[in-house]
């Protein structure tokens, strides 16, 4: 999935990490969400391994999400929290953000 589009990693690591967890939960119903102390990033535990969009991650500093955490995370969104892309640099193809 990470290789499906050049923006996927940014989307699922900068605002839509909980949505990525929900995707993983469909594939692996035993998936459990964990949230960091700053309450701004979610990873997923599946059979003792921890994941986010970049792959395997360290779970240090993450705790299981509460019902309240999950309710709040439902509203997280890359498109609502990140800059708007107005195009790409003609030289390096990086997004131009405002």
Image (cartoon, rainbow, N blue to C red):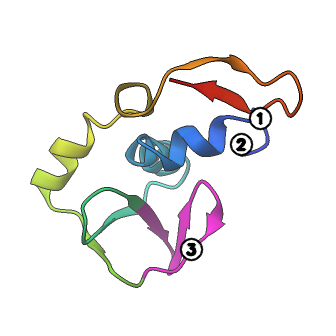
**Where does residue 39 sit, x and y in percent of width and height?**
24, 60
Q: In the image, residue 30 lies at what x, y percent? A: 42, 62
Q: Using a 10 Å C-alpha cutoff, classify the residue at mark 2 as few (fewer than 14 neighbours), some (14 to 19) or many (20 or more).
A: few
The label number, if any, that marks residue 59 in the structure image: none
Residue farthest left in this picture: 68
Compare marks 2 and 3 and give the one earlier in the sequence: 2
Q: Residue 57 carries which label?
A: 3
Q: Quick check: can you spot residue 88?
A: yes
Number of the front mark, 2 or 3? 3
Indicate the secondary structure of the residue bearing disc 2.
loop
Q: Mark 1 and mark 2 in contact (Cβ < 8 Å)?
A: yes
Report the magenta residues as a range: 43-59
> Is 67 above or below relative to 72?
below
- Look at the numbered discs 2 and 3 and tell me whether their residues touch, using CB distance below 8 Å: no
Is residue 73 part of the magenta span, yes or no?
A: no
Q: Does the magenta stretch include residue 44?
A: yes
Q: Which residue is drawn at 52% across and 55% down?
A: 28
């Amino acid at each position: 999935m990470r290789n499906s589009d050049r923006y996927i990693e940014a989307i699922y690591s900068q605002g839509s990490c909980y949505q990525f967890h929900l995707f993983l939960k469909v594939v692996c119903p035993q998936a459990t969400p964990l949230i960091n102390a700053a309450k701004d990033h979610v990873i997923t535990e599946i059979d003792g391994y921890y994941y986010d969009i970049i792959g395997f991650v360290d779970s240090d500093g993450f705790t299981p999400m509460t019902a309240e955490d999950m309710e709040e995370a439902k509203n997280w969104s890359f498109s609502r929290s990140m800059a708007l892309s107005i195009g790409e640099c003609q030289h390096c193809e990086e997004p131009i953000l405002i």
